[in-house]
Amino acid sequence: MKASLILLVEDNPRDAELTQRALKKSNVGNPIVHVSDGAEAIDFLFRQGAYADRAPADMPRLVLLDLKLPKVDGLDVLRALRADDRTRLVPVVMLTSSDEEQDVVRSYGLGANSFVRKPVDFAQFVEATRILGLYWLVVNRPPPAVVG
Amino acid sequence: MQDRPSAANAHASLLALARAAQELNHELDARAVLRIVTSCAAAAFGADLVVATASHGGSRETARAAVGLDEAALDALDASLDGPSLAAALAPVGLTAISATVSRGARVCGALVAGWRDASRAPADDDRALLDAFASLAAQALALARWPSALAGLHIAPDTLHRAILSNYPSGAVVVFDHALRYTFAEGKGLAEVGLSRAILEGRTIYEVFPPATSAAIEGDYRAALEGRVTRNEIAFNGKTYLTSTIPVRDGDGVVLGGMVVTHDLSERVAAEAALRESEERYRLLFERANEAIWILEAEGPEAGTIRAANAASARMHGYTADELVGRPITMLDVPDVAADAPDKLRRILAGEWVDGQVPHVRKDGTRFPVEFTAGLIDVGPRRYILAFSRDITERVRARERADDMMRELESFSWSVAHDLRAPLRSIDGYSQALAEDCGAALDGEGRRFLGYIRESTRQMAQLIDDLLTLSRVTRSEVRAEPVDLAQIARDAAQRLAHLNPGRAVTLVVAPTIPALGDARLLRVALDNLLGNAWKFSAQRGDARVEVGETSLDGERVFFVRDNGAGFDMTYADKLFGVFQRLHSAAEFEGTGVGLAIVRRIVRRHRGRVWADGSVGVGATFFFTLDSEAQAS
């Protein structure tokens, strides 16, 4: 059985690359799918548009979701996810630059499982990613419906 | 024994008497009238005794004509008896008597009695008719006669109680005069003020007391009083104003006994009225010239809400003249369908509350503008009105909208800063690290050093962004007043600091609990900064000690954070709390220069003060207070 997928929703290609590097450095071996805006994320999750052919089994085990995204922003993606039975239980970790209180409150209000602010210091970022991967991919028992 | 007189003779005598009385007019006094009547009657009847009595306003006169009778026995008779009683009382003296009533209108004012010795003759019907005619004539004459004795009574017996009362008559005087315009009584504190006294007045006529001009001026009023009329005058004298009332003095039967002048010093009242007029003028000007619209509205009844008064500002503000507003309903200025809570406000006003509010109003030209008002109930005499003040707040609303816009812009700016400014920094740091890791072999020592500088600067900038965001957040966020424990917050902050600086050994001294009222989240930020500073500036000491506590200054609770670190020069104490102000170089101590500005802003948002005390090499103490009223309650 192949390792479960991580969906990384991040518009900044530098940030995306560094996040993937951090995940790799923290020994998270799961395959990572990177999409660069909210619309694409929704297409992937709901197997539509460019992702209509995605295998149903490739439902992500974890979504790393940026807040500030072109087209459809992170909160809208989260809202759409939580509104659909297929994706209602997928663990979503908000991975973002800001920790403005309003963002944190809204994210949790819409059903985010976790809120992590990306540290500027890359070493700290790697550490945060390591803990995050360890928790959500190893320690945490995923909801049954999304076990791929 | 005498002959019975003929009726014709008697009638002629009476006519002569009547004419005489008419001519004498009121030069004749009452006693003289009675004397003439009795002697004429005695002659006309051939009676042995004729007695006449009359009373007038409390004084009584008696006269008798007797022939060969015992005068002492007659003196013993009680003349105050009415006619029939007196006639009956003559029987013991040996007389048979008849009586007639002397009347004035319907009122009995005296009696006429004629008597004969028993043996002489019995009174006949003719005698009675004649006596009635005499009595009627006597009444006519008495009506014109003077009654000096009545006025003399006023003068002679000024009851001591009355005199005592009137001598205390404040700010004025009371004088009484008789029909000869002679003062019979004078009392009152005001006499001396006008140069008069009881001694000057009593017993003298106005002509004797005053110079001709003055007596001529007052004579008319005095005579009017004697004729039963009242006159009032305001007289200015010696810088004062007196109200004089010249009024008739009547007895219980309404007969004018004399006159009285009551003088009252009005100066105080006149001055008070002048002051009142001036005050009214002042308030009228205040009302008229006020920049704020002032309204007086009908509070109750069918005309409730009608404008009773509106000042120039009210008119100007709404594009009307004041005349166009007065008498119209205030609701004509309302924007239709907007004042939904108006009935509730009106109810609260009528319940006695002063109510504030904002409503849109319509000008005469139809344009709308926002108005802020304060209104409440006032009592003017027995009536209740609504007093309202209002002002045009167009400018303020605009300013608030501008401020709101700016705040929204600032919020979105901060949000962008939070997101967008940090992203490139992460890239710089991440790729520098990647470079060091992946291409480290290709770099020499200097290259690695430069990479280190890049990463260090990145960290500093990230910290600065975070601090500025915190500062901006502190400004924008609401401040709650909740119970907090500053000691616990300090211990938590110290724990975080210890975790971040594992190499440091700092002794934290703090009370078990420091309860206060404030916003827990903001106070945590403030103590994080204060303790962070204490930690930072005591880094060069092996025995670093940070104390968090509470003291009292002039009864106010003062909280403090004290360290034994590098301290600072008090000369620059005022620069401590400014943004980007630093007293130490970055090489000495790291920092963005924003931390204490954040602390000050948090404390100020709690309506408190913050200040510092310190000296170089000894340490620093930062004091702060929180809303003192909230802490006390």
Image: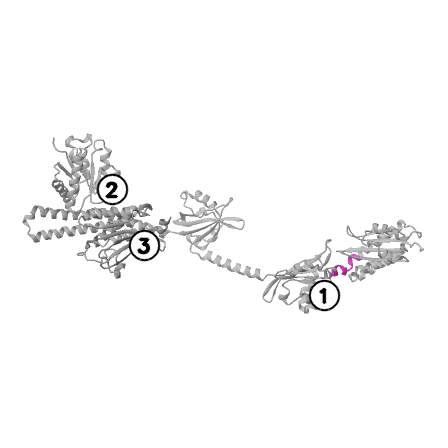
Q: Secondary structure at mark 1?
A: loop
| Mark 2 nearby-residue class (10 Å; few <14, some 14–19, many ≥20) | some
Pointer 2 residue: A104
Task: State the image coordinates of residue B609 (x, y, percent, origin top left).
Answer: 32, 54
Amino acid on which disc 3 is placed: Arg
Residue positioned most to the front: B543
Q: Are marks 3 and 1 on the same chain?
A: yes
In percent of width and height, residue B22 lies at 80, 60
> Around disc 3, counting alpha carbons within 10 Å, would you say few (fewer than 14), some (14 to 19), or many (20 or more)?
some
Tell me which chain the residue with mark 3 is part of. Answer: B
Q: CA distance from mark 1 to mark 2?
A: 108 Å
Residue B465: image location, x then y, percent:
21, 50
Q: Is residue B64 left or right of residue A9?
A: right
Give the magenta range.
Answer: B141-152
The secondary element bearing badge 3 is classed as: loop
Q: CA distance from mark 3 to mark 2?
A: 32 Å
Q: Quadrant of residue A129?
A: top left
Residue, x 21% and y 58% (percent of image)?
A: B584
Give the residue type that dot 2 points to. Answer: Val
Quadrant showing the C terminus of chain A: top left
In this figure, which residue is indicated by the disc labeled 1?
B203
The tag on residue B609 is 3
Specify the subunit that label 1 lies on.
B
Mark 2: which secondary structure? helix
Prevailing SS of the magenta stretch? helix
Amino acid carrying mark 1 in the image: Gly
Residue B632 among magenta residues:
no
Total numbered circles: 3
